[in-house]
Amino acid sequence: MKNSPLKCDFPETDLEQQLEKKLYRTHGTRLASPPALKVAGVSDSSEGMEVGVAYISERFMDIRTAFLTFRRGQLVVINLFMIIVLALGWVVSLFYSKALLGVLIAFGPVWAVIYLFETFFPLTLPVRMDRQEGFVYVGHRGTFYRIPWDELEVTFSYNWQYLGSGVVWERQYYAQLFMREKHYFCGKPPKMPLQRKRVYSGFKEEDMYRRWNFIVRYYNDGIFDGDADNLVMANYDTYRNYISSKSIGRRIFSYFVLIIFMPTMFWWKYTPFKYKWPKEVEEVFGKANNY
């Protein structure tokens, strides 16, 4: 199958070929920075960015990585599925008494495993963009880097994913940030002179560009009007501040829906099972751990 290039106009790069350990093969690698430029013809709006943003202020922004995008939504899917299945099981139990028990035996263990995963699997730290001092902070397996914005190296690439029978292949896109040994800040010393970290993974190329354009726009120009409304669901604190101005009935209903469909927002706020920024980073920002 032909590997056609990405649609963006950024130059090709062999940066990935410099890695000592290649976890997966990617194609059409394009260097998005330095310098950090926007992809022409793509929006830089914060609309739809709440999944990828853990915190935002005029000083800094915390960007969620690809894995947490999945964790944010998996309980929504499983809870909605279980509500439907249990409702159907209850209806059938009116005619067959053991139907509801059968549903719980069949699907209950999967439900429990996903909740145990959410409870005990530690939350990873986001990538922190400090626009005041001009640095990007990255934690990677116990090693922490502080990369000057003007030296930030980000690439766009893709690989082919097999999605099922009939030879159905689809591109999965990546935005990856590269960490060099010279930018080591604290924590465990780097094991390799060059490593990479995914900051986006998905099947829509334009979504990858939109997220990148929003990051560049934020760093250069700060928060725009409308960003607060677009990022209401970024974390529990922003949602709580938003809902506090509503009526009591609206607040009760909103919290009920949140508990049923997105309990991760509460859990990520209060869970003890999460990584924290080291004291060297806390000396810069204070205790600000977002996920």
Image: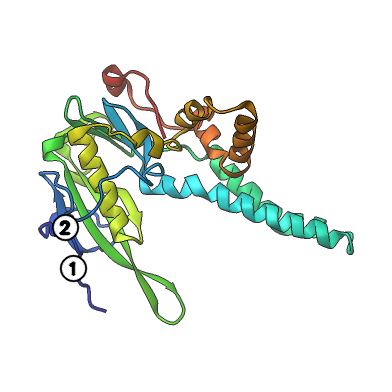
In screen coordinates, is 88 left or right of 204? right
Q: Amino acid at mark 2?
A: Arg
Kind of element beneath mark 1: loop
43 shown above or below 183: below
Residue 125 lies in quadrant: top left
Seen at 46% across and 50% down, the residue is: 70
Residue 283: percent from the left, percent from the top?
Answer: 28, 17
93 shown above or below 65: below
In screen coordinates, is 224 left or right of 246? left
Q: Quadrant of the C terminus?
A: top left
Q: Amino acid at mark 1?
A: Pro
**Residues at marks 1 and 2 touching, judged by CB atoms closer than 8 Å:** yes
Distance from Cα at disc 1 to Cα at disc 2 = 9 Å
Seen at 59% across and 36% down, the residue is: 254
Sequence-wise first label, 1 or 2: 1
Residue where numbered disc 2 is placed: 30
Residue 210: percent from the left, percent from the top?
Answer: 28, 50
Residue 208 lies in quadrant: bottom left
- Observer-nearest of 285 and 220: 220
In the rendered image, is residue 23 in sight? no
Circle 2: is it few (<14), some (14-19), or many (20+) Cα within 10 Å? many
Residue where numbered disc 1 is placed: 5
Q: Quadrant of the N terminus?
A: bottom left
- Observer-nearest of 245 and 255: 245
Residue 232 tag number: none
Residue 169: percent from the left, percent from the top?
Answer: 37, 74
Circle 1: is it few (<14), some (14-19), or many (20+) Cα within 10 Å? some
Kind of element beneath mark 2: strand
Residue farthest along the front direction in this orientation: 247
28 shown above or below 261: below
In the rendered image, is residue 54 in sight? yes
